[in-house]
Image (cartoon, rainbow, N blue to C red):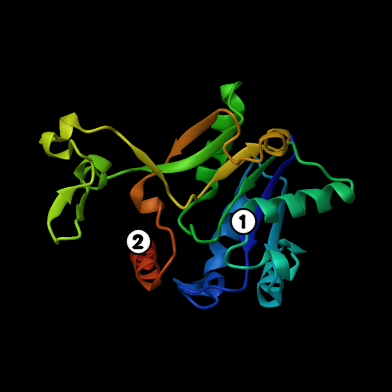
Amino acid sequence: MNILAIIPARGGSKGIPHKNMAMLAGHPLLYYTFEAAKKSSLINRIILSTDDENFAEFARENGIEVAMRPAELAGDKTPMKDVINYHLDELEKSGYKSDAFILLQPTSPLRTENHIDEALRAMIDDGKADATVSVVDVPHEYLPMKLMKLEEDGALKFYQADGEKYTTRQELSHLYARNGAAVYAVYTDVYKETGSLYGTRCLPYLMKREDSVDIDEEFDLFLAEAIIQKRKM
């Protein structure tokens, strides 16, 4: 099976300038996703999608194939599906078509090759699934029935009208949230038919909270560094 890994990394970033090359425990952020993808036993082609020549040069130094994207696909509001469609079409023009692809965002540096392979195997072995997305448990205090909002008059109200009735954790629903997501895997033909990374039957791949840090601001880098240093100890 031909499984393609797409690593998207545009140059612009508002939260952390040049975020994808931000230093984390001695390495640029991109390094961690490069290493995880290269060590995967199921991925057999990896491309970095970027508009930034510095990112491209770092990828080449690490043995990663570079696929430059046009400037019009590098804006902060550019839909990811437009980027994916562009690269899938360009690869097909060159004679390559993947059976499945996996989107690996560099903002999930604690995602490893084991996470990648387990998520892919879950999709493949299920027999009926056509996609997998990585998720994390939503802490009980952040569930919809526990949330509250301020009314215009300054009064605090439950976000859900019946929120007050939920007084014990046992009464709460068990919900999940995408953890970035660190992993999106989908069969290529299904993606092309549906235009969705979730296909028609998407399986969850549950990851631990400590593996699910999503780098969006400086605090996230601090948290990821603390976890990496603790693991080294």
Q: Name the residue under label 2.
A: 227
The amino acid type found where label 1 is placed reads Pro
Q: Nearer the viewer, residue 232 or 71?
A: 71
Residue drawn at 43 percent across, 42 percent down: 135
Residue drawn at 72 percent across, 70 percent down: 71
Horizontally, residue 231 falls left or right of residue 78, namely left
Give the answer, above or below, for where 232 lies relative to 19.
above
x then y, percent, for residue 122: 54, 30
Give the answer, above or below, for where 30 lies relative to 90.
below
Q: In which quarter of the image is the N terminus?
A: top right
The amino acid type found where label 2 is placed reads Ile
Residue drawn at 12 percent across, 39 percent down: 164
Element on which disc 2 rests: helix
Give residue 174's quadrant in the image.
top left
* Residue 38 in view (yes/no): no
Give the answer, above or below, for where 67 lies relative to 163.
below
Q: Mark 1 points at which residue?
A: 79
Residue that lies at the very extreme toward the front in this rendered image = 153
Q: How far apart are marks 1 and 2 (CA)?
A: 31 Å
Crowd rating for badge 2 (residues with CA inside 10 Å; few <14, some 14–19, many 20+): some
x then y, percent, for residue 109: 48, 59
x then y, percent, for residue 208: 36, 45
Counting the numbered discs, the total is 2
Element on which disc 1 rests: loop
The residue mark sitting in front, 1 or 2, is: 1
Does label 1 or label 2 sit earlier along the sequence? 1
Q: Nearer the viewer, residue 209 or 177?
A: 177
Residue that lies at the very extreme toward the top in this rendered image = 127
Horizontally, residue 184 falls left or right of residue 58, namely left
